[in-house]
Amino acid sequence: MSNFVQLWVYLSGQPLLWLTATLVAYVAADAIAGASKRHPLVNPVLIAVILVSSVLLLTGTEYPTYFAGAQFVHFLLGPATVALAVPLVRHLPQVRRTLVPMLVALVVGSLAAIVSAVLLAQAFGLDRASTLALAPKSSTAAIAMGIAEQTGADPALTAVLVILTGISGAIIVTPLMNALRLKNYAARGFAAGLASHGIGTARAFQVSPLAGTFAGIALGLNGLLTALLVPLVIKWLLG
């Protein structure tokens, strides 16, 4: 037992430990999701979060220690977002045909996500810091954390809320769209990417390449628009 403790003390000081643990957790979670035939409720991100969180709790590891080792994954959020331009080019003719409806849906959806988050936070009596952290929840994590820093919110709390939003959207989107009998995969994907950013986009790609393409467009455009709208909405609603 003492040898195990000594080994853990040594490994916990290595920066690659938590990066490796994160990757292993996601590979295991993705295998579980694959075994379930990609059922919406079996979300690999949610499973990976539970696995990593369990390890952190069992080992008593603080989040800053974990992030110091796993921050390379955070760095890759930017390049991964840019890489979504590849499917965009492949479906460019269809994107051009639906440009105007997309822009209208983008503005309405982005405003609805921000305003509803702020109003619900106020309705449930959340403090100003929590409300500010919740406002950019529907934009991708890299952008949301930057917005949080600019508005005085806690970036770590914002990151948690972004992940919860993405997981919820990824789980709900397919059953919801099926219930609404919405068969246009471009519209389905755009809604998923706008409401639940990268995690929703990953789910859209699992359903249809076309849905994934439009989800990627929504993810990128909503990130930009959210960065512009959040300070204005906060000033308007919170003063």
Image (cartoon, grey):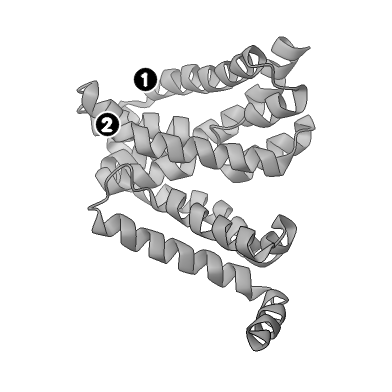
Q: Going from the N terminus, do you reach mark 1 or mark 2 first? A: 1
SS class of the residue under badge 1?
A: helix
Q: In this view, does 54 lie to the left or right of 48?
A: right
Task: Give 206 or 219, whichever is nearer the viewer.
Answer: 206
Task: Give 199 or 228, whichever is nearer the viewer.
Answer: 199
- Residue found 63% across the figure and 29% down from its top: 134
- Residue found 70% across the figure and 84% down from its top: 6
Q: Is residue 31 shown above or below 188?
A: below
- Quadrant of the rendering where the C terminus is positioned: top right
Please state which amino acid type lies under the numbered disc 2.
Answer: Pro
- Quadrant of the rendering where the N terminus is positioned: bottom right
Q: Is residue 231 shown above or below 208?
A: above
> Dividing the picture into quarters, in which one does residue 132 lie?
top right
> Dividing the picture into quarters, in which one does residue 129 lie?
top right
- Residue 225, position in %: x, y? 58, 28
Q: Is residue 224 left or right of residue 99?
A: right
- Residue 156, position in %: x, y? 69, 44
Q: Mark 2 sits on what residue?
A: 175
Instruction: Report if residue 143 is visible in the image.
Output: no
Please state which amino acid type lies under the numbered disc 1.
Answer: Pro
Q: Residue 101 carries which label?
A: 1
Cα–Cα span, label 1 and label 2: 23 Å
